[in-house]
Image (cartoon, rainbow, N blue to C red):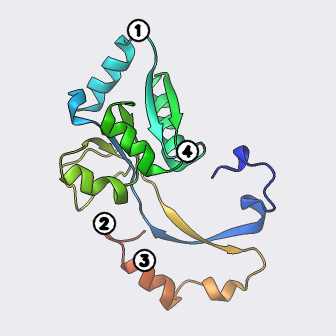
Amino acid sequence: MAEALYPQCSYRIDADFVPVAITAVVPNVLVVNPASGLTDVRMLMDRARAAPGPMSYCSSGSGTSQHIIAEMFLCETGLRMLHIPHRGTAPAMNDLFAGVCPMMFPGMGTSAPQIQGQRLNPLTLTVSRRFVPFPQSRNVTEGRAALHRLGGAPRELFARGNPVLEYVGDQAGFAGGAR
């Protein structure tokens, strides 16, 4: 995902790997500190536009899905914000709890317990359909994790009907199963 940031890699995603199967749908979620008083994306956008300087957002680091999703959000909304990269999700979330940055797009795996404990307010999910643990949440776009094989690996290992891939697809924890 971050090839442009790491041009010295010894491999190329587009040339050395071949998509095999979607193994999971892993939503990210736009979250804010409850003390911010923000309850929806429109309020966030209005506050960002009214701010005298750029608002900031935290991420787990440059080139991560959190960073890229936030930049996509900014492009779509026309907002400008200052990126504050961290060395992982935990330090970024600590700054969100402390009010150092007002928002971030962490993965649901790390944010769900904080949302359930009311330490974070979810504004929107990055999936196109309702997410089972949070059916009331608004959704934006779909994010997926995929399984890739090295270009030289035998194709028959990853053919349709492979029981391992079918099992993985059936284990998804979201409405509608794997796609």
Q: Is residue 175 shown to the viewer in this render?
A: yes
Rounded to the nearest whole Å, what is the CA distance between mark 4 and mark 1?
26 Å
User: Who comes first in sequence, dot 2 or dot 3?
Assistant: 3
Q: Which mark is residue 157?
A: none
The relative height of residue 54 versus residue 25 in the rendered view (above or below) is: above
Q: Amino acid at mark 4?
A: Gly
Q: Mark 3, residues whose alpha carbon is within 10 Å: few (<14), some, or many (≥20)?
A: some
Rounded to the nearest whole Å, what is the CA distance between mark 2 and mark 3?
11 Å
Q: Which mark is residue 61?
A: 4
Q: Mark 1, residues whose alpha carbon is within 10 Å: few (<14), some, or many (≥20)?
A: few
Give the residue drawn at x 18%, y 46%.
118
Rounded to the nearest whole Å, what is the CA distance between mark 1 and mark 3?
47 Å
The residue closer to the viewer here, 168 or 177, is 168
Give the residue drawn at x 65%, y 49%.
2
The relative height of residue 12 versus residue 4 in the rendered view (above or below) is: below
Q: Return the residue at label 2.
A: 174
Question: Which structural element holds mark 2?
Answer: loop
Question: Which structural element holds mark 4?
Answer: loop
Residue 136 in the image, given as x and y percentages of width and height: 18, 49
Q: Which mark is residue 52?
A: 1
Q: Return the residue at label 3.
A: 169
Q: Mark 4, residues whose alpha carbon is within 10 Å: few (<14), some, or many (≥20)?
A: some
Give the residue drawn at x 54%, y 42%.
68
Q: Mark 2, residues whose alpha carbon is within 10 Å: few (<14), some, or many (≥20)?
A: some
